[in-house]
Each structure stands twice: as structure tokens, then as C-alpha cells.
Image (spheres, helix red, strand yellow):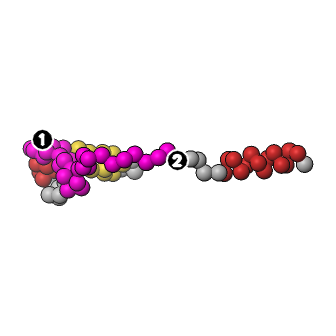
Amino acid sequence: MKTIATAVIASLFAVAPAHAAPKATPTAEPSPAVGALSVPVRNAKTRYCYKTEMTGSRIVSRVCKTRDAWKDIGVIVPESL
């Protein structure tokens, strides 16, 4: 009976919520806005990668080429990338 009571008390401590630390006061420095995220610089050497299956294999491999190299083989890279 004593072990059951000990187990019940121990389980209550295990399930009880932990005390949270007090929240920090907000700083005067504003956080960056969502629209202000840095956009990666794209140039002629920027490589675009696609995951593709090669003929005769089910293994997906990653192929990376420049926009012009993809254009030469007939792949259209979206402008939003």
C-alpha cells in the first residue's frame, strides 16, 4: 500500500507543469519585417538543382546546372527561382 501511495505521488510530480521563467521585456529594437528578408543574388553562374531519375535506374539523383545549361537541353527554369 505504501508503494502505491509513493507511485501516485511521484506520478503527480511527473505530470505537474514546470514553472516557466518570466517573459523577457520587449526590446526597443524592432525585428525585421517579413518582406525585408534577403533575396539571394542570381547571376549567370547561379546553379539550379533538380532531383531526377536516370533512364534504367530508380535511384533519384540530384543534377545541378546553370540556367543556360538547362535551357540548352530544353528545360525551362521558372523565373521565380
Side of 7 where 18 appears, left or right = left
Secondary structure beneath label 1: loop
Q: Residue furthest top?
A: 45
Q: Is residue 36 magenta?
A: yes
Residue 73, image x and y in percent?
15, 52
- Residue 20 is marked as 2
Q: Is residue 54 magenta?
A: no
Residue that appears at 85% across and 49% down? 4
- Asked whether the beta carbons under mark 2 and mark 1 sit within 8 Å of each other, the answer is no
Residue that appears at 90% across and 48% down? 1
Quadrant of the drawing holding the C terminus: bottom left
Q: Which residues are magenta?
A: 21-49
- Residue 45 is marked as 1
Q: Amino acid at mark 1?
A: Lys
Visible residue check, residue 66 = no
Residue 47, image x and y in percent?
18, 44
Is the stretch drawn in magenta largely helix, strand or loop? loop
